Image (tube, helix red, strand yellow):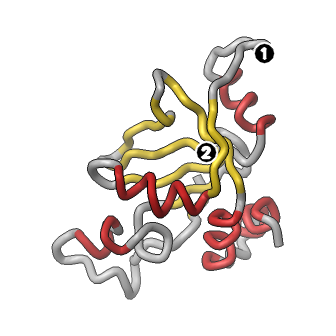
């Protein structure tokens, strides 16, 4: 299935976390640039990078935040794997990715093992967390 199909399945209550993360890794996403940096927001101590599945989702998000429909948007396209494996570890502190923020099909990829490298996975680096068992974070939560 495609990334869009995996996201839709997760929102329909039939998630396959491994397939969802795998499709995100293989898919080229649009990442907005603001002030020469990747657009992100911090929430509850986690830096969230914004990524979009296509230019229409990026434009929808920008317009919802006050940009005019003709505003030139700056972005980079990159594989989801590059965000998870290279960009996230380079950020100081915990960081994850939110895909298609503000849409009905938004999806989050939190900084946990199985999504980001183990060296930056909060479930493996925080004292007292084992990363398994009841209550452990699950890959690909709906935003």
Q: Nearer the viewer, residue 136 or 18?
A: 18
- Say few, some or many: other residues with alpha carbon within 10 Å of mark 2 (under 14 / 14 to 19 / 20 or more): many
**In this rendering, position of residue 8 left or right of residue 107:** right
Q: Position of residue 124 (x, y in %)?
A: 29, 75
Q: Nearer the viewer, residue 15 or 30?
A: 30
Disc 1, SS: loop
**In this rendering, position of residue 137 left or right of residue 68:** left
Dot placed on the residue nearer the N-terminal end, 2 or 1: 2
User: Which image quadrant is residue 130 in?
Assistant: bottom left
- Say few, some or many: other residues with alpha carbon within 10 Å of mark 1 (under 14 / 14 to 19 / 20 or more): few
What distance separates the C-alpha of mark 2 from that of mark 1? 19 Å
Q: Position of residue 20 (x, y in %)?
A: 67, 70
**In this rendering, position of residue 40 left or right of residue 29:** left
Q: How many marks?
A: 2
Q: Nearer the viewer, residue 54 or 77?
A: 77
Contact, mark 2 vs mark 1 (Cβ under 8 Å): no
Q: Residue at x 62, y 38 (%)?
A: 76
- Give the position of the N terminus as an image quadrant: bottom right
Instruction: Identify the residue under disc 2.
Output: 51
Q: Residue at x 43, y 37 (%)?
A: 41
Q: Position of residue 68 (x, y in %)?
A: 72, 12
Depicted 50 relative to depicted 66: above or below: below
User: Which image quadrant is residue 17 in?
Assistant: bottom right
- Which numbered circle lies on residue 69? 1
- Which numbered circle lies on residue 124? none
Q: Residue at x 73, y 48 (%)?
A: 53
Depicted 59 relative to depicted 10: above or below: above
Q: Position of residue 97 (x, y in %)?
A: 52, 52
Disc 2, SS: strand
Q: Residue furthest left?
A: 127
Q: Residue at x 51, y 25 (%)?
A: 34
């Amino acid at each position: 299935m495609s990334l869009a199909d995996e996201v839709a399945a997760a929102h329909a209550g039939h998630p396959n976390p491994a397939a969802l993360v795998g499709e995100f890794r293989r898919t080229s996403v649009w990442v907005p640039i603001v002030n020469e940096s990747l657009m992100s927001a911090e929430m509850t101590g986690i830096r969230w990078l914004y990524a979009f599945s296509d230019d229409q989702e990026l434009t929808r998000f920008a317009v919802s935040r006050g940009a005019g429909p003709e505003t030139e948007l700056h972005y980079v396209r990159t594989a989801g794997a590059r965000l998870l494996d290279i960009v996230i570890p380079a950020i100081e502190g915990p960081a994850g990715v939110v895909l298609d923020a503000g849409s009905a099909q938004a999806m989050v990829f939190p900084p946990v093992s199985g999504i980001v490298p183990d060296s930056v996975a909060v479930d493996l680096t925080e004292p007292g967390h084992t990363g398994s068992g009841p209550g452990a974070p699950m890959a690909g939560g709906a935003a």
